[in-house]
Structures are given as C-alpha cells and as structure tokens.
C-alpha cells in the first residue's frame, strides 16, 4: 500500500474519510451546476479581460479534462473550442492584459502611445472646456492624436476616463419655504402648454403653501399679464378670517409686477416677495405641481385644443384638491388641510393599518401549504 497502514481498520477509516470528502465535493458540484443553470453565463459574449483569470480557467480545464473529458468540461464552462484554442495561442505568444485583440490581428487600432496621449488630453484641466468630440478634432490639428470623435468617445466610455468638470455651485436650501397655517404663503406662476398643432396656451395658478391646494387658476389662449390680479382676488375670496395678509411668492415675470398687482400689495391685502431675488428660496412648490400636472395627466391625452386642455385641467384640479391624498399630510387631501376638516384621517388610517395586519396574520397562519400538510 505504498507505506500506508494496510490493516482493515485503517482502510475502513480511509474509505470513510474519502466518502465524506466525496459527499462534500458532490454537494459543492451540485450547487455550482445549479448556479450555472440559473445564471446561464454566455462565454461566447462574456469578455474576460484579465490574463490571470484566463490562466486560472485554462489550468482548471487542463486538470478536469482527464476526468470528465474536454467536451463535457467545455460544455460546463460554456466555452467554445475555438475560443479555448485562441486563449492557448495567446498564452504561448503574449500576455495581453485588458486587450480586446492582438495588435497584429487589428493593425489599424490605436497604438498604446496614442491611447496614452488621448487619455492625457481628455483628463487634462487645460482642455476641460472642450467637448470630447471637438477635442478629437483639436488633437488632430495639434498633431498629437489622429483619431475620430467616435473613437475618443468609445475609449472614454470603455476605460472610464473622467473629464475634470466638477461643477461648483453655491450652497442652496435643501428644503423650500414652509408655511405653518393656511393662507400664510401663496405661490403664483405661469406655465406654457404646447398643443399638437404647435400653438401654445398659458396656464396660470395660485397654490397655497401649507395645504398644496389650488386656490385659483386660469387657462388663456394668449399671454395676458393682467390676469394675475384677478386670480389673486379670486383666491382671496376663499380666505377665512384671522391671520395677516398672505405672503405672495412669485418670480420676476412681468405678469407678477403689473399695476393691478402693485395696487393689491399697496392696499395691504398681500405681501409680495420675489423668489431668488428678495429671498433665497425658489418658487419650486408650484413648479413641482406643474410637473405632476403635465407628466401625470396632460401629456397622457391628445392636447388638440384649448377647450380640451381646460377640461383636463379642471378635472385634475378637482381630483388634486378634493380626492387624492397627499403623502406629506398623513393621508389628508389639500381641501381637508386647507379647511381643517381632516384631523380624523391619520387616526383612521392607522387603525385600518393595524386591523389589516391582524387579519393578514390570521389568514396566513390558517393557510396550509403542501409542506405543512
């Protein structure tokens, strides 16, 4: 037995150890085969750029082919015989680390020096103001690298070249202005909606900051700056008593600085503040509502006439104010927040959530699957 203990007891121990090891290897092999069937790696399309990974796979194939046979090994690895032969020839001839192909088989490819020069120009701070496509032409005129813009873009994408274009912005508020009660802060703004025939309609609205309720709106077929004052008067009719005059947050558009709006401000009915001019806050709350209105509703329909857009906006405003709950209000609608009629909603939703979880536990615990049975 080659110097080993050949007693029956020693052989039984050795056989038991080998059987235990065989069971472990069989379990590992089953797991690996299951993962291969699940992931289905396609070695014909999967690129292996590192030479060390190729060498490791070649050594594993050479060790396994004597037991399983080359065809079965290649079937398990998902490797074609032609690609195996190409890797072996490359291993004997040269070691190409992270190369798509051999330079001799692709003689028109850029040389290593040209790629290094392109990388130096792409990542140089002196050329950060030049777009990559124009940088390729500039490199040709300078006589440094003669390559097409598509080649530059492909190299930058494949090799992860990061151009030194880190933008420096002034610090901005991470949260917009927030009111503590209804009619404390209003937002007014105008947006343009393009119809299918290329014409435009102008939509102007006033929204309450505290409740997100649309207080008034108007759709116009042509831009009329004088409508702003009428919208603000209409919004003011819904106000309850108490509290000071609302602070009107508007941009510096001409429609927000007309004589009629100035008269409302001078009368003490409003306090006008220009966003990003007199305060650092932007008018983003109503701009976010514009985005929801357009992308979640208007752009899902054929906008072929101003009358059709007006009907769509009227329906959306009604749904927004009275029916659709707002996540920031614990399930209350803008109308309920504005008029103070939804204080009971958070408690009811919490109770319904607890009841749903209780019933869910009962149903799931009473259910029986095949394993439980």
Image (cartoon, grey):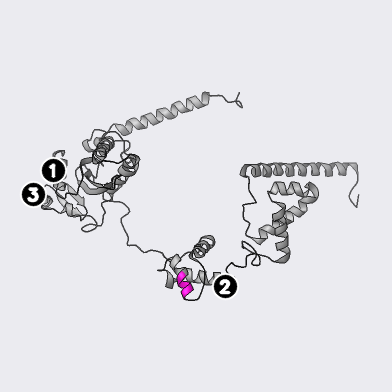
Say which residue label 3 marks: 267
Say which residue label 1 marks: 233
Please tell me how crowded label 3 is: few (under 14), some (14-19), or many (20+) other residues with Cα within 10 Å.
few
Q: Is residue 178 visible?
A: no
Q: Residue 366, position in %: x, y? A: 52, 23
Residue depicted at 91% across the width and 44% down the height: 7
Q: Is residue 51 above or below residue 27?
A: below
> In the shown orientation, is residue 236 left or right of residue 105?
left
Q: How many marks do you count on the picture?
A: 3
Residue depicted at 83% across the width and 44% down the height: 14
Specify start and end residues of the magenta stretch as a single range: 137-145
Say whether disc 2 or disc 3 marks the residue closer to the N-terminus. 2
Say whether disc 1 or disc 2 marks the residue closer to the N-terminus. 2
Q: Quadrant of residue 322?
A: top left
Q: Are marks 1 and 2 in contact (CB under 8 Å)?
A: no
Q: Are marks 2 and 3 in contact (CB under 8 Å)?
A: no
Query: What is the distance, in whole Å, between disc 2 and disc 3 at their CAs?
Result: 74 Å
């Amino acid at each position: 037995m080659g110097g080993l203990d050949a007693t029956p007891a020693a052989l039984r121990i050795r056989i038991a150890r080998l059987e235990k090891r065989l069971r472990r290897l069989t379990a590992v092999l089953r797991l690996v085969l299951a993962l291969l069937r699940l992931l289905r790696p396609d070695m014909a399309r999967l690129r292996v750029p590192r030479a060390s990974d190729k060498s490791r796979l070649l050594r594993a194939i050479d060790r396994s082919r004597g037991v399983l046979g080359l065809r079965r090994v290649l079937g398990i690895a998902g490797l074609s015989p032609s690609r195996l032969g190409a890797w072996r020839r490359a291993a004997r001839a040269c070691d190409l680390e992270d190369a798509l192909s051999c330079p001799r088989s692709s003689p028109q490819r850029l040389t290593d020096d040209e790629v290094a020069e392109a990388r130096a120009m792409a990542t140089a701070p002196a050329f950060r103001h030049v777009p990559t496509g124009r940088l390729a032409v500039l490199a040709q005129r300078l006589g440094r690298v003669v390559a097409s813009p598509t080649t530059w873009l492909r190299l930058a994408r494949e090799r992860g070249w990061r151009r030194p274009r880190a933008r420096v912005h002034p610090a901005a508020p991470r949260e917009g202005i927030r009111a503590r009660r209804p009619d404390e802060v209003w937002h007014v703004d105008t947006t343009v909606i393009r119809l299918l025939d290329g014409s435009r309609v102008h939509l102007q609205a006033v929204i309450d900051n505290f409740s997100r309720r649309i207080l008034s709106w108007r759709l116009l077929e042509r831009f009329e700056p004088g409508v702003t004052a009428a919208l603000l008067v209409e919004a003011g009719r819904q106000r309850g008593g108490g509290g000071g005059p609302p602070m009107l947050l508007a941009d510096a558009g001409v429609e927000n600085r007309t004589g009629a709006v100035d008269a409302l401000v001078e009368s003490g009915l409003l306090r006008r503040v220009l966003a990003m001019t007199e305060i650092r806050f932007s008018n983003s709350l109503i701009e976010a509502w514009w985005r929801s209105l357009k992308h979640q509703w208007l752009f899902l329909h054929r906008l072929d006439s101003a009358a059709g857009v007006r009907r769509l906006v009227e329906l959306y405003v009604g749904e927004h104010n009275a029916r659709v709950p707002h996540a920031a209000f614990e399930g209350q609608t803008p109308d309920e927040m504005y008029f103070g009629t939804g204080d009971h909603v958070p408690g009811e939703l919490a109770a319904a959530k607890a009841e749903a979880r209780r019933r869910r536990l009962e149903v799931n615990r009473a259910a029986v699957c095949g394993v439980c049975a």
